[in-house]
Image: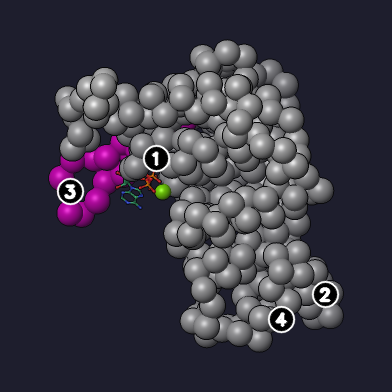
Amino acid sequence: MTGPRGNSTGGASDASPAILFDNVSRTFTTAGRRAAVPAIRDLSFTVEPATFVALLGPSGCGKTTILRIVDGLLQGDTGRVEVFGAPPKPGPDIGFVFQNFRLIPWANVQDNVEFGLKSMPLTRAERRERADHHLELVGLSTFRHAYPGELSGGMKQRVALARALATEPGILLMDEPFASIDAHTRELMQIELMRIWTVRRPVVLFVTHSVDEAIILADRIMLLSPRPARVIESFDVELERPRWTYDARAEPRYVELRSYLSDRMRELVVSDPASEFFGRDLVPPRGR
Ligand SMILES: Nc1ncnc2c1ncn2[C@@H]1O[C@H](COP(=O)(O)OP(=O)(O)OP(=O)(O)O)[C@@H](O)[C@H]1O
Ligand SMILES: [Mg+2]
């Protein structure tokens, strides 16, 4: 971080990036709504290899849409998207941890983790070995025969993480993966993720509504506007890694960035005409 202000606009650069969005727009039309919904408009940013990026933005601004475009599940209407220099396509090089786990309810933990490996040229034994390794990594080896319905929310999330990691993807897309986990487990999961990321170093796009989560995890934070999403400011988080070995939250840089981002997030919601908070002053009067 260089001061509280953003240090880049997130625009496309000349270096060869892992992910490139160049003026990408995507509008949805739904049967129920007559008006088209522009989810992202003229969105440009790049992500360098081995970088952990947090996407921070108001609800409904288009964050999931961005991840789905990177995954190749969805396409932009206009603009250019490249993942490792080629148009995006779904496959084992991209791991996706969804907003709501999306485990297969009738398959046990082991089979859920093996699911994504079936598209890879691996023998059955190799698949099993990889699944075992990743279940160990997330601390769930003893639950390999359990079914999703028998797991807590935190455990389900760990299965989803193991499944996404098992293909050893170059890009890991994480859509509010810890949002429905209690605060304590969430902190442990953040450390787990950091630990795994430090070894593998995939590119991570991590969607969150939490300013704290964004700062503690990311190399770079992209602050997105209300819908349609564009990058308003981009921040490098220059806190030393590993961040779990000291009290990073007490660092002046952390405190400064947290305060700045929290204010910006509040402003964005209050000044968005589409928001129910539009025009309200959410800051309590001083002295109360
Ligand atoms: N498949 C779809 N069909 C129609 N509209 C869609 C579709 N996917 C997304 N949208 C619309 O695009 C906008 C952005 O949605 P998106 O899911 O990307 O937001 P988000 O930032 O991930 O929201 P949240 O923080 O609530 O998860 C929303 O208005 C949503 O209704
Ligand atoms: Mg979303």
Q: Is residue 148 above or below residue 8?
A: below
Callouts 4 and 3 close, C-beta under 8 Å:
no
User: Which mark is drawn over residue 129?
Assistant: 2
Mark 3 or 1, closer to the camera: 1
Distance between the Cα atoms at labels 3 and 1? 17 Å
Distance between the Cα atoms at labels 4 and 3? 48 Å
Which numbered disc flags the more N-terminal residue, 1 or 2? 1
Q: Is mark 2 within 8 Å of ligand 2?
A: no
Q: Is residue 278 left or right of residue 5?
A: left
| Residue 229 or residue 174, whichever sits in front | 174
* Residue at 39% across, 24% down: 264
Q: Residue furthest front?
A: 287
Q: Is residue 42 left or right of residue 119?
A: left
Mark 2 or 3, closer to the camera: 2
Which numbered disc flags the more N-terminal residue, 4 or 3? 3
Q: Which residue is mark 3?
A: 33
Rate crowding at label 4 as few (under 14), some (14 to 19) or many (20 or more) other CA atoms within 10 Å: few
Which numbered disc flags the more N-terminal residue, 2 or 3? 3
User: Which mark is drawn over residue 142?
Assistant: 4
Res. 18 in view: no
Q: Is mark 1 within 8 Å of ligand 1?
A: yes
Callouts 1 and 2 close, C-beta under 8 Å:
no
**Magenta segment includes 24:** yes
Rate crowding at label 2 as few (under 14), some (14 to 19) or many (20 or more) other CA atoms within 10 Å: few
Q: Mark 1: which amino acid?
A: Gly
Majority SS type along the magenta span: strand
Q: Which residue is mark 1?
A: 62
Residues in magenta? 22-44
Relative image position of residue 244 (x, y in whole percent): 71, 43
Which numbered disc flags the more N-terminal residue, 3 or 1? 3
Relative image position of residue 226 (x, y in whole percent): 33, 31
